[in-house]
Amino acid sequence: MSNKKPASPKGKDDANNKKAASGKVIKPLRRASTAKSANKNADKASGAKNKAKDRSAKLFGRLKNHETEGAYTSVKNRKKAIFNKASGASSRGGFEYDKNRFRMIWGLALIMLALLIGRAYYIQVANAKFYQDKGDELITSVRTQTSYRGMITDRNQLPLAVSAPLATVSFSPHDYAQEYYELNRIRIENPDQPQLQARVKKRLENMDLTILAAAANIPVAELKKAAAIDDSIDFTNEEVVKAALPSGPGSHYLPLLNKVTPEIAQSVSSLNFPGVYEKNFFQRYYPQPQPNSQLLGFMGQNANDPEGGYEGRAGIERQFEKILAGEDGKVLILKDARQNSLKEIKQLEPEVPGQDVALTIDSRLQYLLYKELEKAGRLQQARWSTGMIVDVQTGEVLALSTWPSFNSNNLNEMTGENQRNRALLDVFEPGSVMKPFTVAAALDSGKYTANSLIDTNPGSIRVRGYTIRDHNNLGTINMATLLQKSSNVASTKIALSLPPDAITNMQKQFGFGSKTPLQFPGEGSGLVVTPKEKETARRATVSYGYGLQVTLAQVAQAYAALGAGGVMHPLTLIKTDKPLPSKRIMAREQAMSIVQMLEAVTEPGGTAKAAAIDGYRVAGKTGTSRRINPDGGYYSDQYRNVFAGMAPASNPRLVGVMLIEDPRSQIYAGLTVAPVFHNVMKEALRLYNVPLDKPLKTE
């Protein structure tokens, strides 16, 4: 035996530790067979003790090996370690590694929290209004309350245009079928709820189309065909139900009652029938359509209104659109999933009813004027006729009408020709009705008086290559005869004796060449051009009504100024307590002297004897002018007849101006329009109780 002591277990552990540190894995040494001794009992005791120490050494050795191997083991040695049965925690689950992982997870959590907070801020604060509006759109809607359009009345408060409340009731077969199938689905899926079953059954009984057909007075077969209910389908199958719903034209809109009174519509809408809807609106109605159609205008659909509202498109309806229309109100309403209105939540904008507009028109006189214009127009086979009556003392238009007309309650009758208000829109060469203003210019110049004489021999005059003629040779005449016989030669001599602008200045002073204060939509302004010194032909023609353009309203305004003693009262169609200011344009003595001269026109020997009215002195002037040929010059067989007059001449109260375009039976104004003036003015004087100023004729 060797004298060396055997190495202690501690020494073995140190050796093992050193080898492990070098990166090598050392298997524990197997006990040598030579270690057995004869004293087996002693060996057993020491062997048990050594086994315990070996197990302890193995355990700690493995822990150190794995710890070292996890951090520092080379690739070469790591391969060996793969086959070892090592156990224990790796350093990757240690504090340093867990600390980094902990920080990473909390970092991600904080980022997600910041994103959520940012999103919440964007939705609830920064863009809250947008999402609130989106939410409101799902359960609410804004309904427009159409304001009541104001009436248009005449001077006596009789309605000329009113808005009647009407309603249209329609039926949606699609919505009805959808409700029917939904109730049946609820009935099938809830057999154990008797109360719900009873409510559904009652609701289905109330959906009997026979009830709706009886109330709307339409065949029940038509409703059943439109709804196309199929009781054989599976009500619980959503796709099958969807395929069974009505589709195509008429599936969402089937009119039951169209434009009826609200009382009639209530008989159907009060049933609370599924798929039945009522729409209320106002329909414009004109009690006296033809006489007033061009004056009042008409209503048309507003292309800029998403709900298809109506607005005034012509005449008074358009001119006073804002006053008549008022302002529509807006109401926020709660709606269900099918977009049906449940209740009103609040008023967003108040409804402002339209105001009434009172005209100066007298509906009695308006009707009479239209009937006389129609009668004369048809008798003369004319293109059209128009006229107006004006109150001399105020400038109020008492009547204004045009034939042919149309029924403003049925716009299918309206054409581009019959909708024109000829008295205000159309311009024309007036002819001899302008001669009183030539006389006015002569008197105003100081060169002439009412008794001045003018030599018209030989009944014609040559001006710049043109020959101007009278109907016959009148010889030497005064101003009254000039107007009575309507002398072109005398008018020409006056014009050529005055400055070039004398005649046109007087015409402009009486309102010719400018729009009247009526401010009617589309009103014509006419044209008055001042001739130059060398334009002698133009200076001559202007004096007897050629070479200028006027409207009939301008003629009426000018004659009313003469009748008022040279005071211009602006024309008006609106009844008001604050009329426009008047102005004097001519001395009263001169104006009234012209009126007296005009009396001779309606007396024997004048051109308009048919305009005379028994018991009244009537002053007036005829005008017969040729119609312009678009190809140049004038027509030789087409004329325009105008008459402007006033009564009673001693103290003029009313002015009437009439026009007939292209009469075919007769061509002179004294035979065509003078009778119209007579018939209309006679009744007008009677309606307004104007005193007589002339003895009545006796048989």
Image (tube, grey):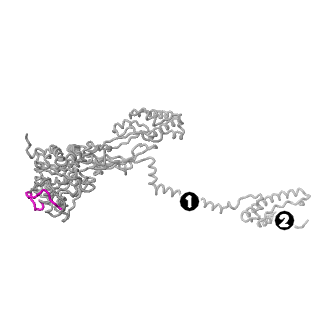
* N-terminal label among 2 and 1: 2
**Residue 465 seen from this side:** yes
Location of mark 2 (residue): 7
Give amino acid for label 2: Ala
Q: Quick check: 539 above or below 306?
A: below
Residue placed most toward the observer, 135 or 382: 382
Q: Which residues are magenta?
A: 443-463
Residue placed most toward the observer, 146 or 132: 146
Q: Secondary structure at mark 1?
A: helix
Give amino acid for label 1: Ile
Assess whether residue 459 is covered by the magenta stretch.
yes
Residue in view at x 46 percent, y 44 percent: 337
Q: Residue 177 in the image: state x and y as whole percent.
A: 47, 38
Say which mark, if any, is on residue 111: 1
Residue in view at x 47 percent, y 41 percent: 248
Residue 335: name its quadrant: top left
Say left or right for 224 vs 549. Answer: right
Residue in view at x 48 percent, y 55 percent: 123
Q: Secondary structure at mark 2?
A: loop
